[in-house]
Amino acid sequence: IINTSTTIVTFLMVFLIQNTQNRDNDILHVKLDELIRATQSAQRSVLDLEAMDNKQLRALRKEYRALAEHRSKTEH
């Protein structure tokens, strides 16, 4: 009985923690989307990253890394 109770409580705690993390993640995404929309020079294309597949995301991340490297080289 104790093992079963412990298993059930553990499962419920994991579910609660995951639900809270998902909610926090959703809130963070909405805030970031609003900041991107409010910034004139921001790339509007990054608002729909959730719709991209992994290959497209990797390509976009590579592009942004190249931009960051280029910027750091020109600043020094």
Image: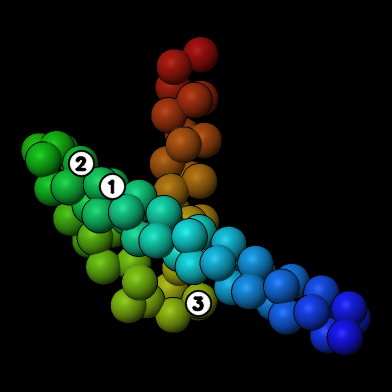
Are there few (<14), some (14-19), or many (20+) residues within 10 Å of tag 2?
few
- Cβ–Cβ below 8 Å for labels 2 and 1? yes
| Count of numbered badges drawn on the protein | 3
Query: Nearest the camera: 47 or 6?
Result: 6
Q: Amino acid at mark 1?
A: Leu
Q: CA distance from mark 1 to mark 3?
A: 22 Å
**Residue in the picture at 50% in, 59% down:** 21
> Which type of secondary structure does the marked residue at label 3 adopt?
helix
Q: Is residue 15 above or below residue 73?
A: below
Are there few (<14), some (14-19), or many (20+) residues within 10 Å of tag 3?
few
The disc placed on residue 55 is 3
Q: Amino acid at mark 2?
A: Leu
Q: CA distance from mark 2 to mark 1?
A: 5 Å
Q: Earlier in the sequence, mark 1 or mark 3?
A: 1
Where is residue 68? Give x, y as percent: 46, 36
**Residue in the picture at 41% in, 54% down:** 24
Q: Which residue is mark 2?
A: 35
In the visual, does 3 lie left or right of 54? right
Where is residue 59? Give x, y as percent: 47, 66
The disc placed on residue 32 is 1
Where is residue 20? Give x, y as percent: 48, 60
In the visual, does 44 lie left or right of 55? left
In the visual, does 64 lie left or right of 8? left
